Amino acid sequence: MQKRSVSLLLALLFFCAAAQAQPPRKRKLAKPGPKAKEELVKPEAKTKEDIMKTVSRPAPKEGLLAKVLGAITINTPNGPIIPFPVVDSSKDLGPSFGVMPVIAVRNKATGDIKSVIVPSVNYNEHLRTTLTYRHYIFPDEKRYFILRASRSERVERELMAYYYTPQLFSTNLRLSVEAKHWVTGKPSFYGFGINSQRGDKANYSLSTTGGEIILDVPLAKEVFINVNNAYFAKRIGDGPVNNGQLEDIFPGIYDEATDRKYFLTNRFSLVYDNTDHPSLPKIGTYASASVLYSNKKLGADYEYRTYSFQMKNYFNYKEKGRFVTAVHYLLQFQRGDTLPFYAMPQLGESTGLRMAGDGRFTDRGKFVFNIEERITLSKTPFYKFISETEIAPFLDVGTVFPKVSAFRLRDLKYGPGISARLVIRPQLVATVDFAYGSEGTNAIIRIGYPF
């Protein structure tokens, strides 16, 4: 449900890429964390292994994008400073604009980037001015820390610390730990079920405080178990949009949800993954089956289970990487106690249906099908990165339901559209999505593929 803005993720992904853009070293890495499989480069390749090469391949001639980025970069003895513009958009809060200087600090002995400091200031009509400080620390080429603090004039704020290591105690176990206090004013609620009305849109804020620990345990070459333990306290409050507050439109639901609730959950996932890249896949299959459970005896306020079944397929036309058909399926449903609406499955802008706002459809279960054709138009170098421009016509299909037996084909919502993307390997994609359908039109600016 949480949607990271361009300002938030651009620095992280861009400079994680910078930290990794050193001469490639052969090493064996375990899934499912950031993977070391490489991108497709050889037009003549006949097998998957043949078309996986490192990002350090000879680059094409310098293009317009590289010239623009080069022109705005300020080189210093400690590293480059890049004053990126910040642009974000959503159907709930509208556009945001600002500036984000990215300050890279290099190790003078090795030349590697050892940390990145990323302050920013941006403005949104509803949140008004938001100040953010980010600090990314890279002790070595594998581990990293993230520290972040943010505060808006209205509603939103965040304190977060995150740590990731791909080789815990020199093993193939991958560990990530996160602690945060986060208040977001972006979500909306329209009522329950697929027949909820757009006119009942109600804004609210969601406060989340707690942390989670995720451990990835390899079982075989492409199979692993993911274990996630999380403990969060959550409650809602007034949102930043003056017209249409949840308290006014759904007073009963608002009064109940303002009480602080405690969620202690454990999730176990069995995952198969033979895709070629953790965030920019061009070939392969990702499939997972998971169960999340909450037990009152362990300290939670609710006793329930959430079941999820997901599959992603990436079909690479002639294995050249220019035409990639991406397909995504998701079935999710809950059993046990009925949860507050904000903890139930939702279908919307960042949860499978791009034509709608976040939280547009809410119920105890949901089904999502997405398909898009990712077409690479051009490639251009910037520093050690290969930047690609891409367009992707897509179709989103989805629905929500109170129980699996209540699923009906006639309830499916359809949202066609097209995306324009900038891919900076090895980890970053910036996306502009245009979608339309029964919910009207929507324009979204964000970081990352939708799946």
Image (spheres, rainbow, N blue to C red):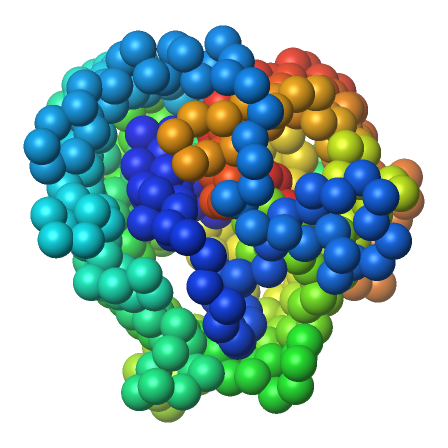
Report whether 104 appears left or right of 285: left
* 284 or 225, nearer to the observer: 284
Q: Which is more toward the observer, 392 or 90?
A: 392
Using the rendered view, name the quadrant where residue 212 is placed.
bottom left
Q: In the shown orientation, is residue 238 left or right of residue 89? A: left
Task: Classify 80 as above or below 165.
Answer: above
Residue 274 in the image: above or below residue 1: below
| Percent coordinates x, y for residue 391 in the rendering | 69, 22
On screen, residue 311 above or below 128: below
Q: Where does the image place residue 114, in percent across and percent down from the top left? A: 18, 51
Total numbered badges shown on the rendered structure: 0
Seen at 43% across and 26% down, the residue is 382
> For the point 34% across and 86% down, which residue is it?
170
Residue 272 point in image, percent of width and height: 70, 73
Q: Is residue 38 visible?
A: yes
Residue 258, visible in the rendered structure: no
**Horizontal side, residue 26 vs residue 75: left or right:** right
